[in-house]
């Protein structure tokens, strides 16, 4: 029997059993749509989290700090770090982050915050990306980047705050005042006294909010080069960028051998991937159970169909159809149902994920949040679903097709 005849006979049967075929396809489709929904949710959340913390530069960056127990012995402002790019060919750059308490003035409101003093290149190494606006550059001397949490002090939304001018005052740490005072005392002659160092750094010109980052902490970024007189201020953190991934572990071990605390974003990324990998396995297990239930329903439908078509099989064999023809007819029937179930499952899964994503984003935006994509289905997963639905149809229809091919035509014609 030609493939064309097999397709024609099956389509004719589908027309005569529309409701049964529809319910069978729907059952398979619902099972596959559950798999699609769960896996797309797992991949979507993974991408959402990873993209929040990872940039290409941040994966090649080490965070270097000094532990609380060795602060008197080690320093991040040591000449070792200054000359590290010259002495170690794998190091691209070393950028410090200095922290100072600060106050912001906007209108009649004054808010306290923490100022992270960093160079523009620091953002790429730290994986900082603005949700609104942009990050400041070398040319932006009076620009700051603030967090959404900081804006709540002034009852401003990100859209309202972007482009606003604010007054900035930095609070000089006590340890910096003592260091500078000791330095002055060493330079002065006997009997001379230095002036009292100011405890605040006021700027005559206001700063413009050029970018906003989404964070649950109260802080801001401002250009390190804009603040003078704080060379003696110890960095709270160093970002050390290496040339390639192979250089991360050797440099990390070298810095740790010197007593520094070192962490790499790759460690966090590996831990996240392990967590999400476990989540994907759990979701896949739930999806497989749903597919198994759908397959049982499909097998039951095909078995009942075989019983109903026993006399039909006998007639076809009596007029010359071979066992192979009957096999092909029933097997194609199950494969077609499985394939249609796969296509309907992808459609149902896509519609459900897009609908839920739209509803959640609508609620989030009305509450002042940002829109995100909670679901993400990789292309390889969609291809896998299509192949799996095809295989499920073939495996489920194997036994009914085999049984139909072995029916004796005389017994089939006598079947009631």
Image (spheres, rainbow, N blue to C red):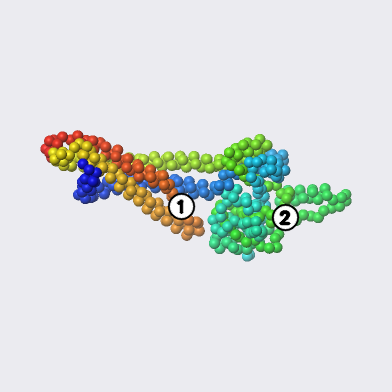
Question: In the picture shown, does residue 245 fall above or below 154?
Answer: above
Q: Determine the residue positioned at 83% across, 49% down.
A: 187
Q: Nearer the viewer, residue 368 or 108?
A: 368
130 to the left or right of 305: right
Q: Residue 61, located in which quarter of the rendered image? A: top right
Residue designated by label 1: 373
Residue designated by label 2: 228
Question: How many marks overall?
Answer: 2
Pointer 2: residues within 10 angstroms few (<14), some, or many (20+)? Answer: few
Q: Residue 307, located in which quarter of the rendered image? A: top left
In space, the residues marked 1 and 2 are separated at their CA atoms by: 43 Å
Element marked by disc 1:
loop
Q: Nearer the viewer, residue 345 or 259?
A: 345
Q: Determine the residue positioned at 32% across, 40% down.
A: 391
- Quarter holding the C terminus is top left
Give x and y (percent) for residue 18: 23, 50
Give x and y (percent) for residue 395: 30, 38
Q: Determine the residue positioned at 60% across, 63% down.
A: 164
Residue lying at the far bottom in this picture: please name it. 107
Mark number for residue 88? none
Give x and y (percent) for residue 302: 24, 41
- Whether residue 149 is visible, yes or no, is no
Choose the circle earlier in sequence order: 1 or 2: 2
Element marked by disc 2:
loop
15 to the left or right of 29: left
């Amino acid at each position: 029997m030609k493939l064309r005849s097999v397709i024609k006979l099956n389509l004719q049967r589908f027309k005569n059993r529309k409701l049964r075929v529809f319910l069978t396809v729907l059952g398979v489709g619902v099972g596959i749509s559950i798999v699609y929904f769960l896996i797309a949710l797992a991949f979507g959340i993974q991408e959402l989290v990873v993209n929040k913390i990872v940039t290409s530069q941040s994966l090649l960056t080490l965070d270097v700090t000094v532990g609380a127990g060795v602060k008197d012995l080690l320093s991040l402002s040591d000449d070792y770090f200054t000359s590290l790019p010259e002495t170690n060919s794998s190091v691209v750059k070393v950028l410090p982050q200095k922290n100072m308490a600060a106050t912001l003035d906007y209108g009649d409101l004054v808010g306290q915050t923490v100022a992270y003093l960093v160079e523009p290149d620091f953002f790429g190494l730290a994986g900082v990306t603005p949700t609104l606006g942009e990050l400041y550059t070398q040319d932006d001397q009076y620009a700051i980047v603030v967090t959404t949490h900081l804006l709540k002090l002034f009852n401003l939304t990100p859209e309202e705050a972007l482009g606003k001018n604010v007054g900035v005052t930095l609070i000089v740490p006590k340890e910096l005042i003592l260091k500078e005072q000791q330095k002055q005392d060493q330079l002065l002659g006997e009997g001379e006294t230095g002036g009292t160092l100011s405890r605040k750094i006021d700027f005559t010109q206001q700063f413009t909010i050029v970018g906003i980052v989404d964070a649950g902490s109260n802080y801001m970024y401002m250009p390190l080069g804009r603040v003078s007189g704080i060379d003696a201020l110890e960095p709270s953190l160093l970002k050390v960028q290496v040339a390639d991934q192979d250089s991360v572990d050797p440099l990390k071990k070298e810095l740790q051998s010197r007593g520094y605390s070192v962490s790499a974003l790759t460690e966090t990324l590996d831990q996240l991937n392990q967590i999400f990998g476990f989540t994907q396995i759990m979701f896949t297990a739930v999806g497989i159970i749903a597919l198994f239930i759908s397959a049982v329903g499909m097998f039951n439908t095909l078995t009942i169909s075989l019983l109903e078509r026993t006399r039909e099989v006998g007639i076809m064999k009596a007029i010359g159809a071979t066992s192979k023809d009957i096999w092909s007819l029933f097997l194609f029937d199950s494969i077609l149902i499985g394939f249609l179930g796969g296509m309907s499952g992808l459609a149902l899964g896509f519609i459900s994920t897009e609908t839920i994503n739209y509803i959640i984003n609508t609620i989030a935006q009305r509450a002042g949040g940002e829109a995100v994509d909670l679901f993400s289905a990789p292309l390889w997963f969609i291809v896998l679903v299509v192949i799996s639905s095809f295989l499920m149809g073939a495996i489920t229809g194997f036994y009914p097709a085999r049984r139909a091919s072995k029916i004796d035509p005389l017994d089939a014609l006598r079947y009631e």
